[in-house]
Amino acid sequence: MRGRAGTLVGSMDQPSHQFLDIARLLEASQPRPRQSWFWYGVAGFAFVILTSSWAAKGTQETQLIVRLLGFLVMLGLFVVMIVINMRSVKEQRAETQRIEAIEELVQLRKWDQAAMMLDGMLSRPTRTMGARLQALVYLASVLGRYHRFEDAIAVQDYLLEHAQFDPATGHGLRLMRAMALVHEDHLFDADKAISELRRENAESAGLALVEMYRDVRTGHPAEALDIFNTRLPQLRAQLGMRVADAYGLAARCHDLLSQEAEAAAAFAKATLLAPAVELFRRYPELAAMKDKYKATEAPKELSAMYSPAADHQGPASEILPGQARWT
Amino acid sequence: MISVQEAISRFRRDSTMSAVLKFALGAAALVALSLHFFPISKTIDPTWVLMGLGVVWVTLWIRTVKGSRMAAESSTLIASGRLDQAEVQIELSLRAFSMSKSVKSMSLLNLALIRLAQKRWADSALLCQEVLLAQRGPESIAKSSRLLLADALLELGDLRGAHEALSGLYNHRLTLGEALNLLRVQTDYLVRVEAWGHLVQGIETKVQMADLMPAGNSARTQALLALGAKKTGRADWASWLRRRVELLVDTTELAGERPILWELWRMEEPKPAEPGAGAAAGLAAGLAVGGTVAEVTDGAAGRAVTQSSDKAAGDPAAGDGAAGS
């Protein structure tokens, strides 16, 4: 297990074709139709009823034996039903716990461990369709982290085509897909996806971020800055610490427009909220500012995390839909 | 809108009824099985009796599953900020009969969560205490109840009660979400009891955890940690965290919610920063001349926070933050 994880981290940019093979995982994770015990139970009851009716015509001894047998069969059926039920609940609980563990790993950006668990879980039929869909949503996030955007898009398309999500989760999923499309330079599809997202929720900060990134990639920094300046309050309110992404992209826009003072200020703000190395991973375009502007220094206890050598696992499309939160 | 007293009385009544019903059905099943040994089984076939009991059991469980779905839907609605709809769903769930006590506990807990968002702390605390009193259901419900209870009691100024609620959590293994909530409430508690040393203990881990929280909670936790850092003479941390908070939220609103936080921006030169971010510094600098910070923040700024929080609580777009980040 550890060895595989090590290999995975080591070859993050060119992962093995065997690992997180989308076609295989989509196929293998289909929940197997479970054997229904209901008709066996009905048959058991019918057998008992028929035997009792037959015994009623027999002698006293036969009736006693049949009554005793009927009691034992019914008791047996009860015990079997309870055991099956308990086993089923236990298995379902274990699957839920696995999903929760994966969710936590994704949140903590422990991508290699999350990938290992997802590969293991989706390599065999899941117990419920809900767990499978959740696992596939996390799989799309992990694939984004490994810059396997084509695969991520394939999973997202599959999810959007085959499942119904609540509006917030669906929106998050479409945001992830749009971001992956921009990363892969599928600009026509990305524009189409952005238009759909705008119709869904024009106030979405995630959408603003996708639009900014598209403008940065297509060389329209002024437009991206316009979005940033207009939508900053929403970006702050909705993205939390991920507003660092918006500051990073704004810095790059100022840099492209040769507004160096503004670029330096925005870069300082971005690196105050997130390590520079993490931002460069999410948006490779930002790496052009690496030696040009000074990143904000973190307190020395955090310097290891913020150093350029630190390995911050963070996906470019780390937009997770449907995360529970407290008000 | 269902009142807290009504919700609690329904919860108690249904809990008792479901316990009695379960016992009665179990006893009836045993009696039906034992009928085999008595001559009466010639006239009353135990198999048919058992099948009848089975039908009753299955019917009741179908109702329970429906109630469970309603409770789960209300959780989703709360997560997306649609509190009014969630409340309607909870009311339906509480009024419907359920065999499972944990389904009812979940509905009661969701109602407590809504009351907390509505700043009805006493109601929230009452509901949590009721769930904890029931002592049944999954461990996660008990943990969430304790966290909510501590939060509500802190707002009510009951520090002792909050401490007791929190200390009950240290024996449990927490999920990441629960650990984040615990950190948020614990940080608030430590500031209120002025345990600055404890507050900044393991500050680097606490900051990394705060990074995972939604914007408002993250900013508040980091601001409180900044205050702790300032009090313990860790100027580098205090300055770094304070600047982060300024980028995340409107500091006027934040300090209006927790007036003690004005100390972070006192004696600072007003800075032309993000919209709203400099306002706190400016106001604090002005107050340094004309009066105490607390007097003013308890007034206008405090009201602004209430209005803004209420708006956020009822705004469907608020849910987008979780999805988007």
Image (spheres, rainbow, N blue to C red):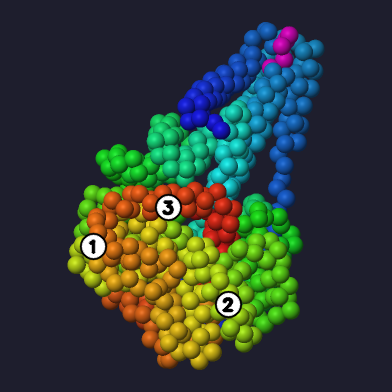
Q: Is residue A36 left or right of residue B91?
A: right
Q: CA distance from mark 3 to mark 2?
A: 29 Å
Q: Quadrant of residue A173?
A: bottom right
Q: Nearer the viewer, residue B165 or A47?
A: B165
Which residue is at a point 62% across and 87% down the rendered structure image? A219
- Residue farthest to the left, as pictured: B233
Disc 2 residue crowd, few under 14, some 14–19, many 20+, Cα 10 Å = few
Which residue is at a point 43% across and 91% down the rendered structure image? A292
Q: Nearer the viewer, residue A187 or A149?
A: A187
The image shows residue A226 at horizontal and vertical percentages of 58, 77
Chain of residue at mark 3? B
Q: CA distance from mark 3 to mark 1?
A: 24 Å
The image shows residue A121 at horizontal and vertical percentages of 59, 61
Q: Does any portion of residue A4 appear in the rendered image?
A: no
Q: Is residue B168 left or right of residue B25?
A: left
- Residue farthest to the front, as pictured: B290
Quadrant where the N terminus of chain B sits is top right
Q: Nearer the viewer, residue A169 or A130?
A: A169
Q: Secondary structure at mark 2?
A: helix
| Residue labelled with disc 3 | B305
| Residue labelled with disc 2 | A226
Q: Is residue B198 above or below residue B103?
A: below
In the image, which disc is placed on residue A43? Answer: none
Q: Quadrant of residue B275?
A: bottom left
The image shows residue B48 at horizontal and vertical percentages of 72, 19
Q: Does any portion of residue B16 appear in the rendered image?
A: yes
Of marks 3 and 1, the one in the foreground: 1
Disc 1 residue crowd, few under 14, some 14–19, many 20+, Cα 10 Å = few
Boundaries of the magenta span: B42-47
The image shows residue B18 at horizontal and vertical percentages of 55, 25
